[in-house]
Amino acid sequence: MAQLICERLTGKPTEGFTSAAMEWGTQTEPEARAVYSARIGELVDEVGFIEHPTIAMAGASPDGVTDDALVEIKCANSATHLEYVLSGKPPARYTTQMQWQMACTCKPACDFVSYDPRLPEHLQLLIVRVPRDDAMIADLEAEVRKFLVELDEKINKLKEIRL
């Protein structure tokens, strides 16, 4: 919340931390998207920020969109990727992110994609389809609305302070 308050008051994005692993993910994502697209035989559109259809000042930035699903791409280190492969499902920590993206885009599913080209070919690409969960989305929307009210209250309070 503090980061959003700063961004709204200054009109400038705040700088974030970037690690070598994050750089790897950013650099490898276009390749992962292309490999995924070839595998499913469908084009993947890159999109920017998509506003939520009913909640102002809220939205999401999925890694890609197909005709019937979103795409969330992770290019983690090899050990983490192999954990995803062995479990056969996306980690719980990404569930909220994917459900929120479906809320914003009204898509019925999101493909969790994990990619690591450093591994043998048969282990490089994991695709797991995650269906939309309307009950979870309703809870997320309620929490976001609450969060945004609190955010606005703090911004208004800060605007009234005279030092």
Image (tube, rainbow, N blue to C red):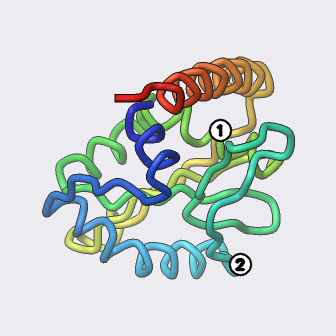
Q: Is residue 89 visible?
A: no
From the viewer's side, name the closer residue of 12 and 58. Answer: 12
Residue 42, label in figure: 2
Quadrant location of the N terminus in the rendered image: top left
The span from disc 2 to disc 1 (Cα, nearest Å) is 23 Å
Q: Is residue 153 left or right of residue 107?
A: left
Residue at 67% in and 48% down = 59
Looking at the picture, how far across and down is residue 17, in whole percent? 21, 53
- Residue at left 41%, top 64%? 125
Q: Amino acid at mark 2?
A: Glu
Mark 1 crowd level (few <14, some 14–19, many ≥20, 10 Å Cα): many
Figure check: 155 above or below 6: above
Relative height, residue 62 to residue 56 (above, below):
below
Residue 3 sits in which quadrant?
A: top left
The residue singled out by tag 1 in the image is 100
Q: Vertical placement of 74 versus 103: above or below?
A: below
108 with respect to 151 (left or right): right
Q: Position of residue 114 (x, y in %)?
A: 41, 57
| Residue in the image at 68% along x and 43% along y | 58
Taking depth in this image into account, of 11 and 68 the one nearest to the observer is: 11
- For marks 2 and 1, the one nearer the N-term is 2
x and y percentages locating residue 10 in the rendered image? 44, 52
Q: Disc 2 or disc 1, which is closer to the eye?
A: 1
Rate crowding at label 2 as few (under 14), some (14 to 19) or many (20 or more) other CA atoms within 10 Å: few
**Tag 1, which secondary structure?**
helix
